[in-house]
Image (spheres, rainbow, N blue to C red):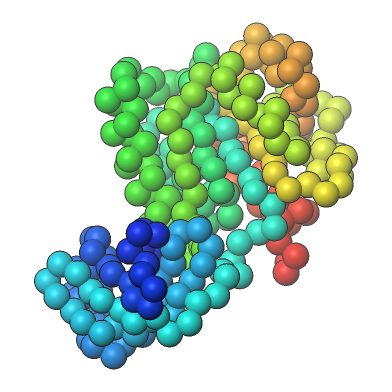
Amino acid sequence: MPKFFVPKENILENKIIINNDDVLHIRKVLRASVGDELTLCDGKGINYITKISDIEDKQILCDIISSEKSNTEANIEVTIFQGIPKASKMDYIIQKTTELGVVNIIPCEMSRCVSKIENAKDAKKKVDRWQKIAEEAAKQSGRGIIPTVSEPVSFKKAVEMMNNYDLIFAPYECEEQKKLKDILYSKKDIKTVAFMIGPEGGYDLNEIKILSESGIPTVTLGKRILRTETAGEAVLAMVMYELGDINF
């Protein structure tokens, strides 16, 4: 059954209004008609089974048949602090980590970032586009929530934010001792996980020093060096396998 996200304010007592870009897709691509069923989601983990009751040019009205909690979300909340890469790589990272179950993606401005965000207007434009990519990926993969792509933050701010999570770490190609597996088994009753991925140029030595002084351990992912667009999804898949999805 087709699934679409709707804003919370569009969900009424027994009806849901669709009035976004999905209207055209439902009318022209799916060629839906009155009486057809759609799965609508509030983006916060609740699915609604609905039946179309009215179709207009710019909105579709659906009657709520039933509602249920989405069963596609992990039992942990994972946040990625991603060193900002080139545009196409960031698009890929957002798409694939959304499919794998990330909840928050926080772009980080780091010393060796190739791509720079010049001003607040540029940042807003990028974040709006990134959020749209996350929404489309969430829709495609059957997620119950739409991951949040935040405004870019400085490296210093990211480090401060990371200490609010139950489990934190940063993959680093020069780390030789501490393994990701050891970190994943280091704590019990983990509800929130945050990890940082460096940009194309990796971390500089001062950033590694700051991570260490802030109590954020660096971990090795093995003897091979992963690209920034590969590392995040690889780590997320490992985290989900070990901690997140009980159905694996």
Q: Position of residue 4 (x, y in %)?
A: 37, 68
Pick the residue in front: 71 or 86.
Answer: 71
Task: Residue lying at the far top in this picture: please name it.
Answer: 206
Height in image: 94 above or below 100? above
Task: Residue lying at the far bottom in this picture: please name it.
Answer: 35
Residue appearing at x 57%, y 49% in the figure: 102
Task: Residue lying at the far left in this picture: please name it.
Answer: 57
Q: Position of residue 132 (x, y in %)?
A: 35, 49
Q: Can residue 38 be seen in this snapshot?
A: no
Height in image: 220 above or below 158? below
Q: Is residue 16 left or right of residue 75?
A: left
Q: Is residue 30 left or right of residue 195?
A: left
Pick the residue in front: 14 or 162.
Answer: 14
Pick the residue in front: 78 or 65.
Answer: 65
Q: Is residue 218 left or right of residue 139?
A: right
Q: Position of residue 18 (x, y in %)?
A: 27, 68
Task: Residue lying at the far front in this picture: please name it.
Answer: 13
Q: Is residue 11 left or right of residue 210?
A: left
Residue appearing at x 69%, y 13% in the figure: 210
Residue appearing at x 38%, y 42% in the figure: 130
Examine the image and state in which quarter residue 33 appears: bottom left
Q: Can residue 237 be seen in this snapshot?
A: yes
Which part of the image, by quadrant, shows the N terminus? bottom left
Residue appearing at x 73%, y 48% in the figure: 191
Which part of the image, by quadrant, shows the C terminus? bottom right
Height in image: 103 above or below 44? above
Examine the image and state in which quarter residue 216 appears: top right
Height in image: 63 above or below 92? below
Q: Position of residue 3 (x, y in %)?
A: 40, 72
